Image (spheres, grey):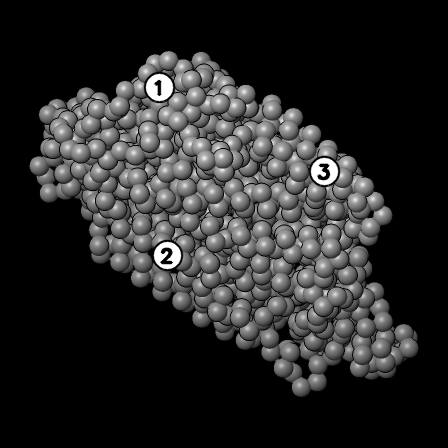
């Protein structure tokens, strides 16, 4: 089998001498600059709008904007553009410094461009968000343990519900494409970094800058609208709502930057020979997710800009008495809101589709069906948004058409089930933690999917909309399938990302706590929803007491399980068993690089000669060619066949090298 | 690792027909269980219906659950069987058979799921027509519903503008609700009648129902509307036509 190599230009072993002012910038300077500029903004805004009608909102908005700009200045995000303005570009040494070369742990606290650093940063950010959101979930469930627990007062309760929702939505949006899309995906396609490494760092640090903005809402009266921020309730909400808007605006920029970067990387930087039918399915999932986010989030951002015009400038976009219309908000929001659930789900399911062949030792069943299904889901997902508005009264005549598009989306989704089941079929199933996540997804997502079909039915939705049934349904999809998939992905790629194996025993214990707790929690919630309990209520009728008590107990089990998982991740990361380069016997490219991964991943760039699913296929069989060692081994990286040994021209590009 | 060997090994065995038969039996058993669950549980949890609309919704829940049972059952049957039969203890020592897809199976799966979807869609459209029939009745009772933080107000414009904070409805007479809000979005939900429509400021939305059961039912707000959202509930009393008339008269109206 012929493959190509090029010796990589030597990288000296010394610490890079470049970097300039970036050497002095890190997360501490970012925090200082953010706080200082935020304070200046607060002070100036305070002087300007002391007595206005919308004074406090304007002050909050200016302060938070200044914080974000200050933070990004302090981390060094603007140094590149400012340098260009002065006619300077980065030297090779500068780029090596930016990539974090030989900087040890400190590179995780800087504006570092290495995609592996960004991936780890995303993973930590995701885990921090889940910790916040999960704690809030525990508060919600504790409050609902009995009909009138008075654990939280109504104002706190509404604030907690809104924050829980938004934090979890953001966490689940980034939980796969952030850590694994940044760390794993470029290696998986045989690239040395992302197409735009500095944009990569930008997207990450924008989220970091945005998190304090979001959390500040808790101290500004909270987000009393639920995560949807529904106007005109949002128009009368306390300044916490301004923090919400500012957070969404920053997050939309971050997701646009990340989306442009990931799609460009996949389009232009796949290894030589990695044609579309040899591109791993996870790459498709990642691109589909971020590609769908590119049109979706600007609409959310636009909805918040209009809201801020209402709130700070006396606009009336959503205020009926001023000629505005709350349905405008609902449309803008759900035009983002439904694609968004597939932004969350597709990469998680795609990760499990990547995992299943490895742990079944079989090729992915019907690769084409998988790709077509992902494309079909993406296409349909932008045409279903008004099923969230059946009962809003906006356009009753459109309910039929939206019922059609919504129910049709179950066809491509169903094909994804077939792909996974077909891959397991007669395989040699290795029930390690990543594969257990696949099984849990099959269980949970069937329930989430079927209950979604009930809700797509207009009359049934009239009865169930706004009830706990809906809450249970989307937790079954986003958590039961999405988060479970992300945990599977974490267990799967943990050895590559950290160089150590995830503690399997703790992983199993956590798995069972979380999955059993999850099903208890949300089965209870389905029951009270069917019986008529509304969502987002701080107290409820005695009729619903048993179901809620059961849900709360289930939620505590989830909480225990998640803490065990957190412990497993932290302890394994610090002193787990050292992982071999390819512990699972997988065939995708990321498993061909050694642990720890060298800075530019590949000393020689791979040339791909087959897809990564050639299990059970001999090199001379009728299947796609795949270079296997004479003894059939697939374990040693050098024998995986994707890396070759003779001299074609290199397919090399990375910004670090330029 | 492993020495080369034929793609189809003898342990798993070239006996797909036997395996298909086993999966079939698991599928059948699961389907039966799920159908029983579908017939018994969802409608029961929703409680006795107080209108033809709720009756239709509960049938939908039952029918959709029954229709979904074989689908869930096939997914879980294959998953369960793979754990029972194809599980390898620890890391597998050789690969499974290189099945890269099966056109007829994929096509059948896609066609069946599309057909099932269309059936459910047609069911839904037919049901939609039936539940809106109350709105097209010749002489419906009109009730204006106004939501405001955090109470409901009902007035009866055809009955001398009687106003009430509890909903009174006569048995078996079609009712059309004109729903609006004074402040933020609320959602008018008569739980046991299976109707819900948002109360939007500046807009009037409509929903309709024919109550067919005497009793007191729950009106709740189904859209987060601020601090006391949870308390925004009241009662809907379905009474006989005579009782309804006397209630109207007592409150200064006429029937």
Subunit ID for the residue under disc 1: A
Res. A440 in view: no
The image position of residue A403, as x and y in percent, is 49, 65
Q: Is residue A210 left or right of residue A294?
A: right
Quadrant location of residue A441? top left
The CA span between labels 2 and 3 is 47 Å
How many neighbours does mark 1 have within 10 angstroms: few (below 14), some (14-19), or many (20 or more)? some
Residue A596 is marked as 1
At horizontal 43% and vertical 21% (from top left) the residue drawn is A18
- Vertical side of A560 occupied by B96: above or below: below
Residue A604 is marked as none
Residue A41 is marked as 3
Decide which of tag 1 and tag 2 comes sooner along the chain.
Answer: 2
Decide which of tag 2 and tag 3 comes sooner along the chain.
Answer: 3
At horizontal 73% and vertical 55% (from top left) the residue drawn is A313
Q: Is residue B63 left or right of residue A540?
A: left
**Residue, disc 2:** A376
Q: Secondary structure at mark 1?
A: loop
Quadrant location of residue A243? top right
At horizontal 72% and vertical 38% (from top left) the residue drawn is A41
Q: Is residue A421 left or right of residue A182?
A: left
The CA span between labels 1 and 2 is 38 Å
Report if the CB atoms under discs 3 and 1 are less than 8 Å apart. no
Subunit ID for the residue under disc 3: A
The image position of residue A499, as x and y in percent, is 38, 20
Quadrant location of residue B91? top left
The image position of residue A374, as x and y in percent, is 36, 51
How many neighbours does mark 3 have within 10 angstroms: few (below 14), some (14-19), or many (20 or more)? many
Q: Secondary structure at mark 3?
A: helix
């Amino acid at each position: 089998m012929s493959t190509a190599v090029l010796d990589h230009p030597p990288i000296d072993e010394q610490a890079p001498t470049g970097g300039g002012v970036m050497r002095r910038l890190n997360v501490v300077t970012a925090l200082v600059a953010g706080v200082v500029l935020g304070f200046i903004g607060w002070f100036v805004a305070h002087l300007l709008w002391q007595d206005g009608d919308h004074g406090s909102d304007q002050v909050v908005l200016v302060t938070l904007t200044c914080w974000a700009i200050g933070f990004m200045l302090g981390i060094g995000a603007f140094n590149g553009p400012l340098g260009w303005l002065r006619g300077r570009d980065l030297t090779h040494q500068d780029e090596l410094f930016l990539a974090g070369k030989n900087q040890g742990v400190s590179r995780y606290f800087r504006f570092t461009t290495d995609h592996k650093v960004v991936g780890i940063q995303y993973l930590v950010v995701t885990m921090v968000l889940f910790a916040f959101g999960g704690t809030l979930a525990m508060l919600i469930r504790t409050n609902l343990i009995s009909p009138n627990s008075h654990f939280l007062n109504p104002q706190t309760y509404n604030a907690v519900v809104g924050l829980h929702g938004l934090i979890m939505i953001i966490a689940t949006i980034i939980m796969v494409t952030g850590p694994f899309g940044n760390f794993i995906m470029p290696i998986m396609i045989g690239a040395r970094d992302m197409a735009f490494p500095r944009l990569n760092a930008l997207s990450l640090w924008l989220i970091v800058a945005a998190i304090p903005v979001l959390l500040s809402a808790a101290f500004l009266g909270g987000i009393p609208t639920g995560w949807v921020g529904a106007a005109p309730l949002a128009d009368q909400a306390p300044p916490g709502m301004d923090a919400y808007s500012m957070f969404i605006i920053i997050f939309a920029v971050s997701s646009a930057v990340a989306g442009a970067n990931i799609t460009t990387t996949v389009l232009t930087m796949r290894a030589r020979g990695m044609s579309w039918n040899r591109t791993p399915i996870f790459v498709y999932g990642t691109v589909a997710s971020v590609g769908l986010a590119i049109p979706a989030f600007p609409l959310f951002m636009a909805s918040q800009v209009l809201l801020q015009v209402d709130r700070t400038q006396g606009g009336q976009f959503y205020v009926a008495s001023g000629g505005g219309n709350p349905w405008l908000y609902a449309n803008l929001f759900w035009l983002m809101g439904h694609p968004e659930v597939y932004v969350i789900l597709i990469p998680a399911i795609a990760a499990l589709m990547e995992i299943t062949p490895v742990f079944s030792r079989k090729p992915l069943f019907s690769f084409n069906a998988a790709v077509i299904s992902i494309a079909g889901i993406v296409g349909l997902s932008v045409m279903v948004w008004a099923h969230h508005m059946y009962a809003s009264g906006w356009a009753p005549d459109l309910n039929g058409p939206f019922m059609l598009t919504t129910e049709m989306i179950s066809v491509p989704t169903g094909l994804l089930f077939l792909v996974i089941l077909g891959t397991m079929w007669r395989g040699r199933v290795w029930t390690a933690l990543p594969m257990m996540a696949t099984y849990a997804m099959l269980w949970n997502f069937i329930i989430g999917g079927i209950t979604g079909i009930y809700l797509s039915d207009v009359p049934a939705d009239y009865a169930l909309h706004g009830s706990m049934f809906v809450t249970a349904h989307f937790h079954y999809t986003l958590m039961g399938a999405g988060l479970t998939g992300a945990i599977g992905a974490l267990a799967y790629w943990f050895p590559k990302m950290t160089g150590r194996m995830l503690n399997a025993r703790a992983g199993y214990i956590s798995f069972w706590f979380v999955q059993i707790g999850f099903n208890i929690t949300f089965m209870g919630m389905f029951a009270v929803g069917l019986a008529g309990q509304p969502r987002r209520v701080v107290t409820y009728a005695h009729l619903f007491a048993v179901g809620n008590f059961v849900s709360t107990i289930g939620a505590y089990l989830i909480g225990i399980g998640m803490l065990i998982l957190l412990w497993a991740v932290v302890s394994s990361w610090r002193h787990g068993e050292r992982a071999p380069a390819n512990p699972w016997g997988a065939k995708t490219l990321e498993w061909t690089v050694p642990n720890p991964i060298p800075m530019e991943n590949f000393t020689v760039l791979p040339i791909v000669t087959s897809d990564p699913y050639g299990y059970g296929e001999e090199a001379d069989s009728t299947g796609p060619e795949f270079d296997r060692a004479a003894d059939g081994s697939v374990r040693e990286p050098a024998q995986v066949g994707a890396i070759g040994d003779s001299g074609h021209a290199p397919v090399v590009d990375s910004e670090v090298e330029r | 690792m492993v020495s080369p060997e034929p793609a189809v090994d003898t342990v798993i065995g070239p006996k797909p027909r036997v395996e298909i038969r086993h999966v079939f039996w698991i599928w059948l058993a699961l389907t039966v269980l799920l159908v029983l669950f579908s017939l018994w549980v969802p409608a029961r949890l929703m409680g006795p219906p107080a209108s033809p609309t709720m009756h239709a919704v509960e049938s939908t829940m039952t029918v959709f659950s029954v229709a979904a049972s074989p689908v869930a059952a096939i997914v879980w049957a294959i998953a369960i069987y793979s754990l029972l039969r194809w599980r390898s203890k620890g890391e597998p020592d050789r690969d499974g058979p290189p099945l890269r897809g099966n056109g007829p199976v994929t096509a059948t799966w896609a066609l069946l799921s599309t057909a099932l979807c269309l059936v459910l869609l047609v069911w839904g459209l037919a049901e939609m027509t039936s539940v809106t029939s109350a709105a097209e009745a010749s002489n419906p009772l009109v009730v204006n519903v106004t939501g405001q933080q955090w109470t409901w107000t009902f007035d009866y414009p055809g009955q001398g503008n009687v106003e009430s904070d509890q909903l009174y409805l006569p048995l078996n007479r079609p009712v059309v609700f004109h729903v609006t809000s004074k402040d933020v979005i609320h959602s008018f939900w008569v739980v046991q009648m299976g109707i819900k429509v948002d109360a939007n400021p500046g807009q009037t939305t409509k929903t309709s129902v024919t109550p067919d059961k005497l009793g007191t039912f729950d009106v709740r707000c189904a859209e987060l509307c601020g601090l006391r959202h949870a308390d925004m509930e009241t009662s809907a009393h379905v009474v006989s036509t005579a009782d309804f008339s006397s209630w109207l008269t007592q409150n200064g109206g006429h029937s």
